[in-house]
Image: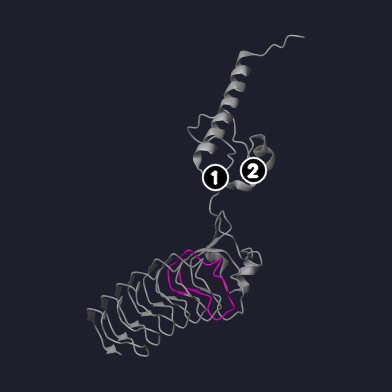
Amino acid sequence: MSNITIDKNDLIKIFNALNDSANIINEIINASESSEVEIPKSKVSKSKGSKRKTEYLKPTKENLEKFGLNGNNIVVATEPVIVSKRKTKYIKATKTNLEKYNLDSSKVTINPDGSIDYSGDVNLSGRNLEEIPFKFNIVGGNFECWNNSLTSLEGSPQEVGGGFYCYFNELTSLEFAPVEVGGDFDCSYNQLTSLEFAPVEVSGNFYCNNNQLTTLEFAPKKISGDFGCWKNQLTSLEFAPVEVGGNFRCDNNRLTTLKGSPKKVGWNFYCYGNKLKSLEGMPEYIGGKFYD
């Protein structure tokens, strides 16, 4: 048999690679007694501070079988991904396309991700839109997309300096709604069953009336203007804002108690058209009139 000469450094590399593979197997075996095993996501390059000399193996069926692992019992950890529900691609923000929607190209800034910032008001209302045509990021003025056929707010700005108006659509979710609204937020006359994804900060009025809400969970904690949740299916005011600067309207729901009402209402409080058995829980302060 002929002699095979192996360089010392190559021998060390082979030993380390085998040692790393053995450690991976031990970690998987000891990680859980469950039939489902979580494998770290395959890494393209070494993370900062990593002492690994080789890349992680991808958890393919072939690689797993080499270590006696069943691919059906593997759960690969991944980062959460927002899945687009759009049927069409966003329109490019060319001067011609912008003018079709009465938008001034001189007020547009195009961001690296293709989204646009607009320094004025955006009015897309009454156009029979099924989707928001551009991918907005920041809008300095009002953003109006009311009276369309929208089923999703995908494409909406994340920040609006003025009001955000998406009423009279076919929305079942507020996903993709702005996080911050400098004026009013009006999502009334839709098919919403939850306020999840509603803006965290609203500086004006907040209207979610004429929907199918059964809870006020995810509503902002403080509203400077009016808060309107009338004509829904609410049986409780739990999660209502703690303080409302203007009117508070919860009339025409299915309430039997006022528990959960705001502590302070700056103007009128409307709760008629319910099935109230008592006024327990009504606000500690009402600046205007009480309508029951």
Q: Is residue 56 magenta?
A: no
Of the 4 image quadrants, the one containing the N terminus is: top right
Q: Which mark is residue 38?
A: 1
Where residue 289 sits in the image (x, y, percent)?
A: 26, 88
Quarter-of-image position of residue 283: bottom left
Assess whether mark 2 and mark 1 are in contact (beta carbons under 8 angstroms). no
Left or right for 28, reference 58: left
- Circle 1 packing at 10 Å, graded few (<14), some (14-19), many (20+), is some
Q: Given the current orientation, which residue lies at the most extreme left position?
A: 284
Where residue 13 sits in the image (x, y, percent)?
A: 60, 21
Please name the amino acid that badge 2 sits on: Asn
Figure check: 222 above or below 3 = below
Q: Which portion, as a residue range, is magenta? A: 140-164
Q: Is residue 147 magenta?
A: yes
Q: Nearer the viewer, residue 148 or 78?
A: 78
How far separated are the C-alphas under marks 1 and 2? Answer: 12 Å
Q: Which element type, helix, strand or loop, lies under badge 2?
A: loop
Q: Residue at x 37, y 74 (%)?
A: 204
Q: Which element type, helix, strand or loop, lies under badge 1?
A: strand
The residue tagged 2 is: 70
